[in-house]
Image: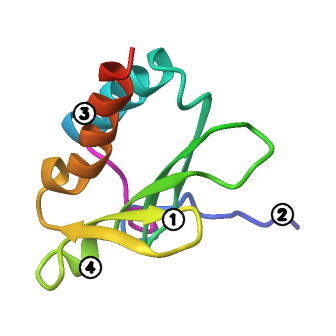
Amino acid sequence: MSVVTPFPGPRDRQEVAAFDRIELQRILDLYGRMVAAGHWRDYGMSFSPEVAVFAAFRRTAERPEVRIEKRPRLRLKQGAYALVSEHGAVLKRGHDLANVLAPLERRLMRLVGED
């Protein structure tokens, strides 16, 4: 006759790695300052069960210049946050997002100071 499909319950949902509001605010603040300095033009975000990624692009059609990754499973080991270069090399990894973003903050100071 008719088939009743059960509504998914809380146990059926899969956890997804994500940035919380404070982390995302800090990342978007840095992104806005890099755009104002003329260095970045676009960004993309990706969320999966293992990793949340914020990617910043110089141009839309290229690979991202940097990726900021959050891997919650590594929070007790190497640190949940990682700054990954365009070529896939891990530039910085740690437990604190501010320390991981420090190389980008220093680059921003040089970009603004070059005027």
Residue occupied by mark 4: 73
Which mark lies nearer to you, 3 or 1? 3
Identify the disc placed on residue 48: 1
- Left or right: residue 56 compared with residue 29: right
Sequence-wise first label, 1 or 4: 1
Disc 4 to disc 3, C-alpha distance: 21 Å
Quadrant, the N terminus: bottom right
In the image, residue 87 sits, relative to residue 23, either above or below, namely below
Disc 3 to disc 2, C-alpha distance: 51 Å
Looking at the image, which is closer to me, 4 or 44? 44
Residue occupied by mark 3: 26
> Disc 3 on helix, strand or loop?
helix
- In the rendered image, residue 64, in percent from the top left (x then y), is placed at 61, 52
- The number of numbered discs placed on residues in the rendered structure image is 4
Write the start and end of the magenta stretch as one range.
13-20
Number of other residues with Cα within 10 Å of mark 4, as a class: few under 14, some 14 to 19, many 20 or more: few
Q: Is 19 covered by the magenta stretch?
A: yes
Q: Label 1 amino acid?
A: Ser
Q: Is 24 covered by the magenta stretch?
A: no
> Disc 1 on helix, strand or loop?
loop
Disc 1 to disc 2, C-alpha distance: 34 Å
